Image (cartoon, rainbow, N blue to C red):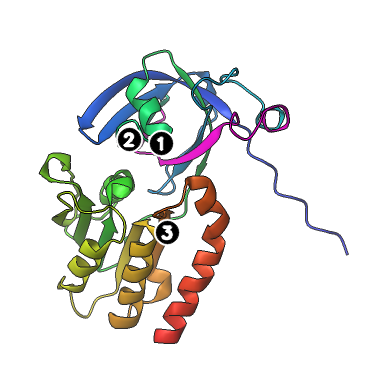
Amino acid sequence: MNKPSPTPKRRPFVVEVLRSKQLTPGMIRIVFGGKGLQSFRAGEFSDHYVKLQLPPPGATYSAPFDPEQVRNDHSAEECFRTRTYTVRHWDESLQELTIDFVYHGDTGIAGPWAAAARPGDKVQMIGPGGAYSPDPDAGWHLMVGDEACIPAISASLARVPVGIPVFALIEVEGAGEELRLESSGELRIEWQYRNGRPRAQGNLLLEAVRSLELPAGLRGQAFVHGEAGMVRDVRKHLIVDRGMNRTDVSATGYWKFTETEEGWRMYKGEWKRLAELDVDAAA
C-alpha cells in the first residue's frame, strides 16, 4: 500500500514594516508590506494567523534566514523564537498585512520587537493558517477572549450578518485598553477589567459567560480563545451546562499561564485530549 505523501512544509517569507501605531498602552498595530506578500492569501477564515520567526536580541543573523540552518548552526539560546499572531486585516489590493501585537513592556520577545519596530525593518514569517469563521446560518454568536483574542474577535465581528445577535466578552487590564469594535450584527460588548489582578485563570470571563442571557430556541455559535485554563472552563460550561453542540464551539488556548509559547506548543495536544475527557466526564 502506498504511503500518503508528507505534507509539504510552508516556506517562510519576509515582510517589512510600513507603519506602526500605538492603539492602547497594551496594543501596537503594525502594517507590513513588501514583495514577500505577493503570494499571500487570506480571507476564508476570520481567525487567520501567521507565525513570526524572531531572532533573539543580539543574534548574529537576521531575516531572511534558513530556519533549519539556524537550528543546526546556533545554540538554543541563539535560535529564533516562533510567535503566533492573528491577521487583523489583509488588503489584497494594496498588499498590506495588519497585525495587532499585545505589549506587556520589556517582557517577552514579540512585544518589545513591535514596540521598537520602525519602517523598513524586516521580519520573517510563515502562514497563513486558520479554521474559524462565523456561520451565517447561526441564530446568534458568542465571542470570548482576552487581549490576545481581540484581533480575531474584531475580524470575526465583521463577518456576522446584519441584525444577528452577537455577544463579545473581552478581558483587559482596564478601561484604557478598550478598543472600538463594530459589527453589522446586533452587537453587545461586555469589557471585563482585571484592575491589577493576575492575568491567568480567566475567572472573570467564565463568570461573565455564566451570567449571560443568550437567545433561547436558536442554534448559536461560540468562539472562545485566549488563556488555556479559561478556554477549557468556558467551553465545558457551554457544552455541558448550556447544551451547545461541540461543533458549534470553536475553542483554542492561545497561551497558557506559566508556559512559554514553545512549552505550550509541546503540551497543546495533550491539553486538547484532557479537555475532551473533562467534557465527557461531566456530560
Separation of disc 2 and disc 1 at Cα? 16 Å
Q: Label 3, on which residue? A: 252
x then y, percent, for residue 29: 30, 30
**Residue 247, label in figure:** none
Q: Which of marks 1 and 2 precedes in the sequence? A: 2
Asked if the stretch drawn in magenta spans residue 78, the answer is: yes
Which mark's residue is nearer the viewer, 3 or 1?
1
Which residue, as the protein is rendered here, is positioned at the far right?
1
Residue 89 figure quarter: top left
Task: Point out the stretch of residues depicted in magenta.
Answer: 70-92
The three-letter code of the residue at mark 1 reads Gly
Q: Label 2, on which residue? A: 100
Q: Is mark 2 on a helix, strand or loop?
A: strand
The three-letter code of the residue at mark 2 reads Asp
The three-letter code of the residue at mark 3 reads Thr
259 relative to 190 in the view: left or right: right
36 relative to 192 in the view: left or right: right
Q: Are dots 2 and 1 in contact, CB under 8 Å?
A: no
The residue located at (32%, 25%) in the rendering is 115
Residue 40 lies, with reference to residue 246, above or below; the image says above
Using the image as rendered, state which of residue 232 and residue 169 is in the foreground: 232
Separation of disc 2 and disc 3 at Cα? 19 Å
Q: Label 1, on which residue? A: 108
x then y, percent, for residue 153: 29, 50
Using the image as rendered, state which of residue 210 and residue 40 is in the foreground: 210
